[in-house]
């Protein structure tokens, strides 16, 4: 099908007559930030328009030399501009935020654009201004925590990190920050994300069919973009809360040409520990910090350079006995090129690093577990706009991975021997192409094909296992010798039919391949999870998802309703055999079992986006199951992230310019866990035995949060606000874990001991900008 599809498209494209072409960037008139997804079209022919890409670039084909162009973007004033074209014109446009009016440009009331953006299935774009109003634990603005309030997205426990999207595991999400991969996107064991809200310009979640330029994960794509920096004037801002302080500064290095943005955040719980009289408390450490930096420079009207960097670290140390620290480093160097009025290119050189070290200190000796995953990436993209309502994207991607999967270091006198694990080397490549074609006012087509390859190479010893997972053969490979290679096609297609400007029906199919796997014996995401590449024994994970949906707007476009259902089948899903040993184990592949998986569900989202009263109600019914030989006698069993019902209600009420009230309520079925089914005694010791994997449930989870924000009167350029929020308003005791012990009063009985993290958690945060 795809062999015929793309040639036919190109033949169709060049059969059209060429017209006048205008291209350029659409930016915010106040700060120069590029606007992704802004619409531009001919007022006389609104069906033949286009939108800006991730870098704010557009290319529009016009049928006459003089026309009225209409520019629209949600949150900004609509503009109608009389434009006289010249062939291959390059022209940049600026949009004014809703709060600013000008007499120089004709401003019209925004009409709803919901139906024009309703073509893609499972895509959510998050408004950072809206996120700032939502009550979150300890007052920190959090993009990833907000995503958990959307249908099809789950967490699996109180305070746990990780997003579980449409039946996928947390490790099956591709999380990128300015194109750089972030391998662990959480601070403080999952209570906060690594994304400082002050530094984020936009975040997009793809639950269904993402563009073919995305790949490498089975479940979803989370694309986070940092702010570019104000190229008009200097400013600063931040926030002071009970647990953390944030600060940022931005401004022009050269007005309208170059700008810089720098932000930082640090918690200071450890500083309060210094005030304790007890030295066993005073000498503990518990904090995290992160730094974001981005600079851009328009060296020529057709050439722009971006430099982005992120550094984050968590440190926990208890009484010089135990410690763990982990962190990410990312960097991106990108070069935008306007090749001509119809073609836009971007070249990216990207670096990502994630590492952790867990240490145990004893008298005369110490032990540390260390793991590193590091990669360098080169990516080249092209966007081609040959005709109205037709856009092509194509390119290539190459990533070189180096992995230390968890080695044990020992210092001092100890009977424990160090374990120096072999480094893993892998090379991941992809070619991709896709098109977006609006055939007419009713029918839209998005189709793409990604060809991915993954090769693991030496130097090192590589093992083969028999059916009992016992090593039967060892082969040594030298430097640059390929051990095994996998090549897989990844087709994807998305169809939408606009049966009425307020009603859209959608259908999509996508195949995704994942070659980096996370091994964990924890029920929640952990910073000490182990990354492992595909090999001769561990095959690539394959996921096929089909979904369909219905989108509508009603009551003068104030409300939108989205219904989607999906079915996902998964191959080569990994789980641990009973009693698996995964720490510092060179033969870790012998601890793994492989099988199949399936996930299906129905998602409901009712949203109100205009007026003083806004918010949404989401509901998800879903099931996620695995079938692996040697587990549960080969029968289907629930995956640990399986939760049948999930409800989230978000309410935001802007009383006036000064006061805002907001609240969230969440309820979900308890996730699947493995509890003991009985016990037995041996030599006076009590042991528990287990039967079905994930055959039990944690208690159902529910929580109500509330926040009130007061905006102080603006004084010249100084703006500030004070937010009081309460996490878990009615003090529900949601268990973090359940441990089973023998009842000391009745040895024949077993006690379930629940551990709770939070009841009521108030917070006070002062935010400011200048």
Image (spheres, rainbow, N blue to C red):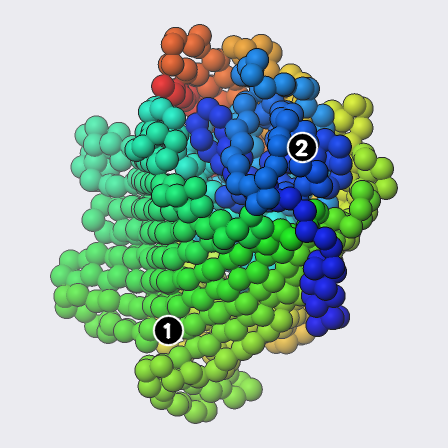
Q: Position of residue 636 (x, y in %)?
A: 70, 67
Q: Residue at x 14, y 66 (%)?
A: 412
Q: Name the element at disc 1.
A: strand
Q: Quadrant of the N terminus?
A: bottom right
522 to 59, vertically: above or below:
below
Element type at mark 2? strand
The C terminus lies in quadrant: top left
Nearest the viewer among 135 and 727 is 135
Residue 614: in sight, yes or no? Answer: yes
Residue at 43% x, 10% y: name it: 714
Vertical side of 172 occupied by 463: above or below: below
* Front in this rendered view, residue 422 or 506: 506
Judging depth in this view, the residue of 6 and 141 nearest the camera is 6
Asked where in the image residue 447 lies, by quadrant, the reply is bottom right
Residue drawn at point x = 47 percent, y = 53 percent? 346
Instruction: Answer with left or right where residue 171 lies relative to residue 60.
Output: left
Indicate which disc, 2 or 1, sits on the residue closer to the N terminus.
2
Between disc 2 and disc 1, the foreground one is 2
Q: How many marks?
A: 2
Q: Is residue 508 above or below residue 277?
A: below
Q: Residue at x 45, y 66 (%)?
A: 398
Q: Quadrant of residue 482?
A: bottom left
**Residue 511 locus on image (x, y percent):** 65, 64
Circle 1 residues within 10 Å: few <14, some 14–19, many ≥20: some
Residue 673 visible in the shown view: no
Graded by Cα atoms within 10 Å as few (under 14), some (14 to 19) or many (20 or more), the crowding at tag 2 reads few
Residue 427 in the image, given as x and y percentages of width and height: 43, 72
Q: Nearer the viewer, residue 580 or 213?
A: 213
Q: Mark 2 = which residue?
A: 66
Image position, residue 619 (x, y; %): 71, 40
Q: Which label was assigned to residue 424?
A: 1
Q: CA distance from mark 2 to mark 1?
A: 60 Å
């Amino acid at each position: 099908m795809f062999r015929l599809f793309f040639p036919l498209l190109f033949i169709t494209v060049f059969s059209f007559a060429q017209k006048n072409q205008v291209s350029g960037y659409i930016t915010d008139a106040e700060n120069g930030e590029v606007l992704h997804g802004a619409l531009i079209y001919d007022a006389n022919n609104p069906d033949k328009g286009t939108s800006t890409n991730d870098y704010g670039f557009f290319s529009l084909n016009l049928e006459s030399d003089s026309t009225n162009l209409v520019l629209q973007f949600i949150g900004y004033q609509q503009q109608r501009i009389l434009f006289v074209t010249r062939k291959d014109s390059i022209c940049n446009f600026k949009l004014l935020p809703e709060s600013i009016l000008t007499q120089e440009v004709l401003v019209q009331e925004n009409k709803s654009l919901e139906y024009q953006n309703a073509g893609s299935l499972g895509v959510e774009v998050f408004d950072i201004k809206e996120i700032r109003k939502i009550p979150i634990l300890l007052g920190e603005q959090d993009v990833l925590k907000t995503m958990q309030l959307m249908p099809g997205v789950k967490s699996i426990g109180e305070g746990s990190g990780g997003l579980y999207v449409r039946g996928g595991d947390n490790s099956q999400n591709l999380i990128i920050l300015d194109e750089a991969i972030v391998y662990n996107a959480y601070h403080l064991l999952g209570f906060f994300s690594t994304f400082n809200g002050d530094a984020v310009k936009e975040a997009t979640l793809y639950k269904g069919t993402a563009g073919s330029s995305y790949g490498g994960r089975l479940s979803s794509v989370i694309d986070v973009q940092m702010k570019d920096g104000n190229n008009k004037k200097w400013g600063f801002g931040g926030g002071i809360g009970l647990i953390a302080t944030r600060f940022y500064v931005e401004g022009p290095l050269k007005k309208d040409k170059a700008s810089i943005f720098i932000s930082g955040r640090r918690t200071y719980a450890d500083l309060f520990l210094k005030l304790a009289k007890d030295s066993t408390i005073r000498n503990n450490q518990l904090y995290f910090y992160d730094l974001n930096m981005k600079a851009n420079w328009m060296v020529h009207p057709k050439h722009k350079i971006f430099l982005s960097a992120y550094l984050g670290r968590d440190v926990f140390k208890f009484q010089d006995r135990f410690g763990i620290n982990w962190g990410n480093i990312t960097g991106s160097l990108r070069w935008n090129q306007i090749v001509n009025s119809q073609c836009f290119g971007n070249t990216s050189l990207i670096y990502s690093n994630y590492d952790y070290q867990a240490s145990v200190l004893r008298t005369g000796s110490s032990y540390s577990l260390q793991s590193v995953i590091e990669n360098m990436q080169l990516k080249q993209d092209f966007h081609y706009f040959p005709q109205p309502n037709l856009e092509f994207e194509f390119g290539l991607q190459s990533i070189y991975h180096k992995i230390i999967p968890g080695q044990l270091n020992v210092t001092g006198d100890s009977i424990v021997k160090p374990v120096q694990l072999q480094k893993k080397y892998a090379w991941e490549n992809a070619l991709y192409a896709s098109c977006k074609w609006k055939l007419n006012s009713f029918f839209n087509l998005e189709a793409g094909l990604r060809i991915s390859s993954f090769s693991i190479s030496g130097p090192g010893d590589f093992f083969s296992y028999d059916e009992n997972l016992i090593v039967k053969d060892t082969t040594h490979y030298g430097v640059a010798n390929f051990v095994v290679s996998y090549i897989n096609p990844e087709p994807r297609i998305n169809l939408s039919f606009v049966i009425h400007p307020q009603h859209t029906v959608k259908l999509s199919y996508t195949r995704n391949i994942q070659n980096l796997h996370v091994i964990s014996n924890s029920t929640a995401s952990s910073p000490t999870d182990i990354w492992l590449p595909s090999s001769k024994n561990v095959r690539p994970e394959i996921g096929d998802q089909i979904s369909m949906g219905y989108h509508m707007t009603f009551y003068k476009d104030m409300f939108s309703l989205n219904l989607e259902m999906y079915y996902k089948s998964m191959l080569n899903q990994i789980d641990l055999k009973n009693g698996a040993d995964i720490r510092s184990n060179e033969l870790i592949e012998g601890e793994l079992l492989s099988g199949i998986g399936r996930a299906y569900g129905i998602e409901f989202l009712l949203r109100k986006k205009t007026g003083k009263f806004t918010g949404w109600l989401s509901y998800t019914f879903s099931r996620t199951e695995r079938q692996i030989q040697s587990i549960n006698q080969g029968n289907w069993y629930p995956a640990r992230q399986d939760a049948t019902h999930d409800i989230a209600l978000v309410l935001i009420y802007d009383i006036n310019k000064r006061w805002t009230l907001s609240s969230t309520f969440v309820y979900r079925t308890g996730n699947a866990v493995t509890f003991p089914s009985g016990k037995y005694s041996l030599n006076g010791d009590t042991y528990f035995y287990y039967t079905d994997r994930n055959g039990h449930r944690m208690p159902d989870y529910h929580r109500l949060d509330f926040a009130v924000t007061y905006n102080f009167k603006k004084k010249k350029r100084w703006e500030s606000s004070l937010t009081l929020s309460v996490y878990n308003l009615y003090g529900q005791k949601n268990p973090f874990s359940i441990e089973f012990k023998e009842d000391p009063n009745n040895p024949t009985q077993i006690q379930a001991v629940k551990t709770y993290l939070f009841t009521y958690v108030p917070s006070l945060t002062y935010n400011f900008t200048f």
